[in-house]
Image: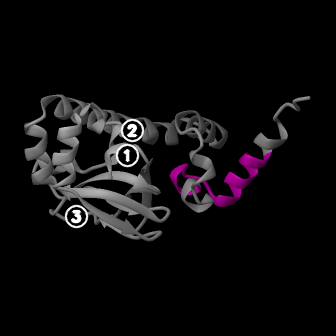
Amino acid sequence: MLHNAFQNNVVLSCLTTQAMIELENILTIAEFSKGQPLLVQGTSEMEQYFILEGVLKRVVTHAEGKQMILRFARETQIETSYAAWRLKNRAPYSICSVTRARVAKCPMALWTEYMNDHPKLKHNFEYEVMRLMSEVMEHTSALHLLDATGRLDRFQDKNPGMIDVLPRKDLAQYLNMAPETLSRVLGSQENSLPLVV
């Protein structure tokens, strides 16, 4: 059932058919409506998520209630709080659905047990976790160093096609700009495209 989705997953593609069947036995499939949280910031109960359909976002909420979107993830990608779980910390951010989403998930302890039996998978997963942490650091740096147009260009380069599936409000929040500014920048990009004859 999940075999095709797993073959295209950034982490799971290294698994054999038998290993995928074993993994399917420990996963639960869950559906989430737009805006529904999968993980709440501050909780100690964490799960591993494999995105089958839809888009998720990683969001940190400050004490004053202000939110910052750290990253988006979609089909073929993962969402995780593995680093916090390994450090025995509470979840430092929430994970919420941006669109209606369907995920395969399992408790972090069970996922870790499974990975320990599959060293190549563990290597790929831990590499992806480090890559995601680096991606979040790059994003927060870009918010400070680039102007609105530069931030949008960077997002489009790093996330081809994602701009077409995200609500403008979420994209504007991620890029740390007002929705009106995003509309203006998008409009100026459309007007500057060369005509193809």
Q: Residue at x 33, y 46 (%)?
A: 78
Direction from residue 6 to residue 72 in the image, left or right: right
Q: Position of residue 141 (x, y in %)?
A: 45, 37
Of residues 82 and 188, which is closer to you in this image? Answer: 82
Do labels 3 and 2 touch, CB within 8 Å?
Answer: no
Question: Circle 2 sits on which residue?
Answer: 8
Of residues 24 and 33, which is closer to you in this image? Answer: 24
Q: How is the image coloured?
A: one colour
Amino acid type for the residue under numbered disc 1: Ala
Tell us which disc is closer to us: 1 or 3: 1
Secondary structure type for disc 2? loop
Mark 1 Cα-neighbour bin, 10 Å: few <14, some 14–19, many ≥20: some
Amino acid type for the residue under numbered disc 2: Asn
Spatial CA distance of label 1 from label 2 is 5 Å
Task: Give yes or no for residue 178 being in the magenta stretch.
Answer: yes
Q: Residue at x 45, y 69 (%)?
A: 35
Q: Quadrant of the C terminus?
A: top right
Do labels 1 and 2 touch, CB within 8 Å?
Answer: yes
Name the main secondary structure of what is drawn in magenta. Answer: helix
Q: Residue at x 63, y 36 (%)?
A: 153
Question: Circle 1 sits on which residue?
Answer: 5
Secondary structure type for disc 3? loop
Label disc, if present, on residue 42 of the rendered structure: 3
Q: Which residues are magenta?
A: 172-187
